[in-house]
Image (cartoon, rainbow, N blue to C red):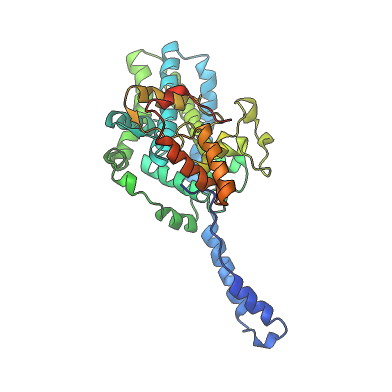
Amino acid sequence: MSTCETATSSTENSEKFSNSNSSSSADVPKDATPSEGSRTESSSRDNKREASWPSVLFYIHLNILGVYGIFVLFSHTSAITFLFTSFLTLCGILGATAGAHRLWAHKTYQASTFLRFSLMLCQTLAGQGSIYDWVRMHRLHHEKFRTPDDPYYSDKDFLHAQVFANIRKLSPRQEKLLEQIDMRDLESDKIVMFQKRFYWLLYPILFVLLPINAPLEYWGDTVQAAIFVAFSLRYLLVLNVAWLINSAHFIWGLDKNHKQSDSNMVFVVTKSYWPQYHYLLPFDYQSGEFGNYGSGCTTAFIRVFAAMGMATKLQTMTTEAVKKGLTMAVDSGRPIVDCLKQAGAEDMCNLQREHYLKNERLH
């Protein structure tokens, strides 16, 4: 899967025309400048992103209610509601990471019908829209990574990628690019298309009514705990953790223009550069979204279901495959990513079926 590709427009012909006729202004049409200006203005309109005011207002209110939920958590919440909320939060995160991201967006492994259905329900608990829409946006993010067409503003800073990109509409140009993303694999997935068709029925039932109703109906907790903890605080946590899938490279990336110290997140999580690796070789199921590799919760989740026979064909890159790919790139002069992919594919043919139990790390 190709990454970090940039689409460049060719202006050589217009530049040659301008240079060859610079000494004779009479030969230049009088309407050339307005034409250039109108094209620039049109391009600016195509790339402009407007604020989605319903999303802006919702995000402001969610932060206020979620932060208040922290106070309610320690004052008006029972232990069982805390455990219930923690469980739903974990399910939502796994639905986004193990499901939408690693299974459906990048095909890092194959899942049984039961596991796919379970991950579909978990992804609904993430509250980030349908799997189909999430994957299409994420694939555009990879295809236009660190270009102005990246929907998650990877050419700017962490705050733009984490928050602003998610509360703004796509530009007209990005809408057109989004329509060109190949989604035929998901369109043939009955579970994904079922969720897409009935998402706005599943969302209020699983994401809204279940978390709020259960504490009130089944163990008699307070209304504050149900609304501000089980719903608002959980939503705030899941949403921001899931958004990190697309913005974590600003914290752990290798780009010198985006210093890792621009976020206090470095004091909360282990510093690593594996998200950068993910943008080079996104097919590895072990690639950690949040700065780790081979030891994260999502990777462990996939391994457990692989041991149960529900997750198969786990794709990864071993240390030997990386060494072989780098050597191949030096000897042949071919692009490093192409050589790594080839070496990884050849190495996968020789790995044992239970290779995921060895927990190999790259060095």
Specify the quadrant of the image occupied by residue 250: top right
Q: Where is residue 174 shown, x and y percent of the image?
A: 48, 55
Residue 251 visible in image: yes
Tell me if 263 is positioned left or right of 353 in this view. right
Q: Where is residue 39 shown, x and y percent of the image?
A: 56, 70
Q: Nearer the viewer, residue 350 or 42?
A: 350
Q: Nearer the viewer, residue 35 or 333?
A: 333
Tally of numbered discs: 0
Residue drawn at point x = 45 percent, y = 27 percent: 299
Furthest-bottom residue in view? 26
Q: With respect to residue 236, does 30 lie above or below?
A: below
Which quadrant is the C terminus positioned in?
Answer: top right
Q: Nearer the viewer, residue 267 or 207?
A: 267
Residue drawn at point x = 57 percent, y = 52 percent: 333
Q: Where is residue 108 shown, x and y percent of the image?
A: 41, 36
Residue 89 visible in image: no
Q: With respect to residue 333, does 44 lie above or below?
A: below
Tell me if 295 is positioned left or right of 189 in this view. right
Furthest-right residue in view? 23
Q: With respect to residue 333, does 311 lie above or below?
A: above
Tell me if 131 is positioned left or right of 33 in this view. left
Q: With respect to residue 298, does 25 lie above or below?
A: below
Residue drawn at point x = 55 percent, y = 28 percent: 292
Furthest-front residue in view? 331
Tell me if 67 is positioned left or right of 180 in this view. right
Q: Where is residue 246 shown, x and y percent of the image?
A: 52, 40
